Image (cartoon, rainbow, N blue to C red):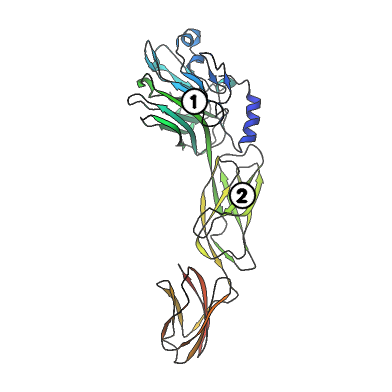
Amino acid sequence: MKQLAALSLSLTATLAFAQPQILNSGFETWQDPAAATAEPEEWSSVKTSDGGDFINNLAPQLCWQSTDAHTGTYSANLRTADTFVGPASGIMTCGRVHAELNPNNGYVFTDAGNADWNQALTGRPDSIIGWYKATIVGADFPTLKAALHTSTGSIPENGTLGNWVGGADWNGPSTTVGEWTRFAVPVNYFSAGAPEWALVVVTSGNGLESEVGTEVWYDDFALIYNVTPVPSENMAYVTADDGFALNVDFSTGGEPVAATDFVAELSDANGDWTAPVAIGSLNTTLGTGTIPCVIPAGTPSGTGYLIRVTNASPFYAPLEAGITIDLSTSVAANAGTGASVRSLDNGIVVDLSRAAGGPVLCEVFDARGALLARETLVGAAQHRLSLPPAPGVYTVRLTGNGVGGAHRVTLW
């Protein structure tokens, strides 16, 4: 592995990603692409192992540049090859391969003292994603393994497990995959600290049991960072004229590499994100923050609203938090005496059975305070209003015959 383009790649990562990523994860730049030692820059394979010239010259080529790409121009093609000691699975790592004549002693590792063979990472991604295609022989299958660690680290762990902050492990299916297919691998964390290094290794097959002829194409790896929102309120009260102010705290394991906008958004009353409403934003270089927000005036009442915090980068994954919104009207809710109002079978029932016989004026207002219906009811009886039922929050105002008050009722 070489880092001849480290500076330009770092600049590219800053522009393309809002958070820490593994460099050259789209495999667009290569070292010696036409040679047997072909490797993506920032990645390495067995031909540049620490085994020395004898082993490296003896080892077969396992990694090729391919023009069959998911995006961009190139992908990495790993192939299982036959050797005098048996099948050798195609392999590629952002660390370095340790190779011996006995393949059982092989592993990959982070060489913290040599920038050619390590990948710095202090973020805490929630998952690793990528795209792959595969031609599988027999019961073979592709793999991805990752260790986010401090100090020294290797895969297999070989006594370094105590340095692991988190790890990921994916075994693909034992089937040929003819179209570019996305895979996602959760990162499981063992401690609350930050890592120093990311060590990722992908293979074409199942280790020492791989089948000759198996080959896999990889492209567009990325680290995904969840963004967790915590609203300061779980109930918001708005009117037709006034919104509701609240704060939305957020946190993510991927601190931005440059200032970026985190935007708090509100779903519709059913939790749908087809047309989200931006309610606040914060430009920051930090992975945590507080966004001042306002629920817009006139937002309809509902218990199914969701809040999330988004970013322009597709590698920030927003999680959701629920909030209930109550749209107050100009009609004061006051239950009064002599009557009760309730919803029943998607309609509104006014119970005047405790009131004396006589006329009672009944007025129905929607959540914005608009008068929907007015009719005269008779005391000492129950009435189902003739108002066409529709989901929403209504206010029913009763006056006359010793009955008074305004009653709030919700139809679902």
Identify the amino acid type marked 1: Gly
Looking at the rendered image, the quarter that the C terminus falls into is bottom left
Element type at mark 1: loop
Residue 282 in sight in this render: yes
Residue 168 drawn at (x, y percent): 45, 33
Residue 117 drawn at (x, y percent): 55, 21
Q: Is residue 377 above or below residue 160?
A: below
Q: Which residue is mark 1?
A: 153
Residue 114 in sight in this render: no
Give the residue at x 45% y 13%.
60
Q: Nearer the viewer, residue 216 or 102?
A: 216
Identify the amino acid type marked 2: Val
Residue 364 drawn at (x, y percent): 52, 78
Residue 344 drawn at (x, y percent): 41, 74
Which of marks 1 and 2 precedes in the sequence? 1
Q: Which residue is mark 2?
A: 263
